[in-house]
Amino acid sequence: MFELVALLVILLFVIGLFIVLPAQMASGRNRNPVVWVLISLVGSPLLAILLLLALGDAPINKSDASIIDD
């Protein structure tokens, strides 16, 4: 029983690290979360997180700015 609980905890940690964290960081920086989850899965979550931190916020397009102003 302990092994099953430990396996579930590890699985939740891995899902959070590979999927949830990069997706949340990307959406908070106006970037496509799907692309960053794929980068996290293909490369590594650390790579995706460091790249998101280094790139910062994405610039807002003029079409996006007009939607915000309305």
Image (cartoon, rainbow, N blue to C red):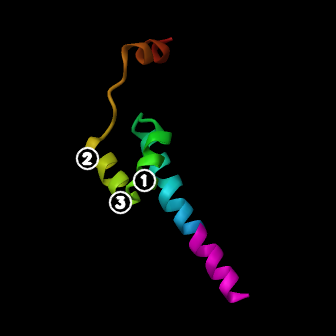
Residue type at the position of mark 2: Ala
Disc 1: CA contacts within 10 A as few (<14), some (14-19) or many (>=20): few
Residue at 57% over, 74% down:
10
The magenta segment is 1-11
In the picture as drawn, the residue positioned furthest to the front comes out as: 42
Residue type at the position of mark 1: Val
Query: Does the CB distance between marks 3 and 2 fall below 8 Å?
Result: no
Give the quadrant of the N terminus: bottom right
Task: Report x, y in % for residue 57.
Answer: 33, 36
The numbered dot on residue 46 is 3
Residue type at the position of mark 3: Leu
Q: Magenta stretch containing residue 9, yes or no?
A: yes
Please tell me whether mark 3 sits on a helix, a strand or a loop: helix
In the rendered view, does 53 fall on the left or right side of 22? left
Query: Does the CB distance between marks 1 and 2 fall below 8 Å?
Result: no
Q: Magenta stretch containing residue 4, yes or no?
A: yes
Q: Which residue bears the numbered disc 2?
A: 54
Decide which of 49, 29 is in the foreground and name it. Answer: 49
In the rendered view, does 53 fall on the left or right side of 28? left
Classified by dominant secondary structure, the portion drawn in magenta counts as helix
Residue at 30% over, 54% down:
50
Residue at 27% over, 41% down:
55
Q: Which residue bears the numbered disc 1?
A: 42
